[in-house]
Amino acid sequence: GFPALDPIPTGRYTDPVFYALEREHIWKKSWLLVGRDEDLEGVGRFQTFDRTGSPLLLVRGHDEVLRGFFNTCQHRGAPVVREPCGAAKRLRCQYHSWTYDLDGTLVAVPDRRDFTKLDESKRSLKPVRCEVYDGWVFVNEDPAAAPLCEWLGPVADEWSVLGGGELRAHGTRIERVHANWKIVADAFLETYHVKTIHPASVSKLLDHRGAAMGLFANGHSRMVTPKWEQAIERQRNQAMPLPTIPGLDPLFFDTNPSYSLFPNLITPLDTIGFPFILFWPVDAETTDVEWTFYGPADETPEVQQAWEHYVQVFDAVMNEDFMNLAPMQRSIASGALDSVPLNYQERRIYHLHEEIDRLIGPDNIDPRLRVAPCLEPFWETLRADIA
C-alpha cells in the first residue's frame, strides 16, 4: 500500500543554509518559465530576467533563433541591457560600449589597440539554456540539464491538447507574500484546505474528497478534482462570453485538472483558459507570487470585459489562500511547530520536498532537515488518458 509519510521538518522553511542550498542546486539547475514566445517575435527583440539572482537575457537572433545569455558584459561585468524588454540591432554595454551581435559574439571594442592580450573569440556573452515548449519560454542555467521536453516527461504530452502556441495572455498579477516559497507552494498542492479556506468559492465548485493525484519524475505532479454535479449543470446553463479552448476532452468540463511543474509552477486548468502561477523566492522568508491568465486570442470588448471579471474572481480566491501564509511563517519561525504531519491528500507536498533533497543531495543537507525518499515506486511513467 501507499507509505505513511514522515513529517516535514519545519527548519526547511526557515534555515538560511538550507535556503542557500536551494538557490544553488534548485534555482540555478531547473527549467524555469520566464515568458512567451510571441512576446519575443522579431529580430532583436529582447527580455531580461533576474528572478533567480542571476542576470539573464533572452534575445531573438538574425536567424530567428531565441537565445539565452547571462546579461553580463565580458569586460567588467556591467549589464549589457538595462531595460526589461525592447528591441535592438546589437547589444551595447552602457559602461564602456563593448558591443555584441545578437548571437552573443563580441563585435566591437572601443580603443581596441590598448588591449594587448584581448582575444575577442573568448569574450562572447556566456550562454544560458533556453528552450520553447508550445509557446512558453523556459531557461536553465545548468548546461548539463536534460532537454526541456525530456524533463517535462508525460506533462508535455498531456499539455499538448491545450494548444499553448495559440493562446494569449489576459492579465498578470504579482503579490509579495511574507513566507518561504515552499510554504506558498505547499498551499497549492492539495485540496484538503478547500472546505475551510474557500467555503463560498472553490468548495462550491469542486469535490475535494474525490481528487485523484499523479506523481511524475523530476518533481512534477497532477491533481484532477471532480466538479460537483450542480456546478457542472450551472456552467452548462450559464451564458459564457469567453470562448473555450478548442478540442478539449469532455473530462475538462467535468473536472479541474491542476498540474505542478517543479519547482515553482502551478496551473489549475479550465476550458476557457487558466492561470500559470509562479512562486519566486525573494529571500528565505519572502516570496513573489506571479500569475498570468492564458486563453484563446480574442480582443473583442465583450470578451475582454469577461476576462477582467474572471480575473477578479480568481484574485479573490488567491487572497483567501494568502491569508494564512505569513502567519504560518511567523509561527514556524517562532519554534512553535517542530514538524508538519502530512496525510494521503497532501502527498504532492512530500513529492516536492523529495525532489528538492534529490537535487541538493542528501549528504549536503543537515540530517535534521532531510526527508526520507519513499514515493518513487508510485511515479507515473506513461501518459494518462486525460485528453
Image (cartoon, grey):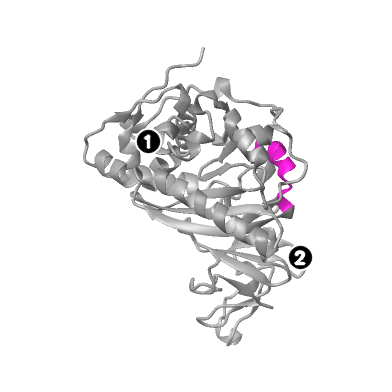
Q: Quadrant of residue 230?
A: top right
Question: Please, is residue 102 above or below residue 212 in the view?
Answer: below
**Quick check: is 105 in the magenta stretch?**
no
Is 182 placed left or right of 32 in the picture?
left
Q: Position of residue 46 (x, y in %)?
A: 63, 69
Question: Please, is residue 221 above or below residue 327 in the view?
Answer: above
Q: Which residues are magenta?
A: 152-165
Q: Tally the marks.
A: 2
Label annotation for residue 64: 2
Query: Could you say whether the residue bearing mark 2 is in a helix, strand or loop?
Result: loop
Amino acid found under the numbered disc labelled 2: Glu
x 47%, y 58%: residue: 174
x 45%, y 41%: residue: 185
Q: Quadrant of residue 123?
A: bottom right
Q: Earlier in the sequence, mark 2 or mark 1?
A: 2
User: What secondary structure is the magenta-colored segment mainly?
Assistant: helix
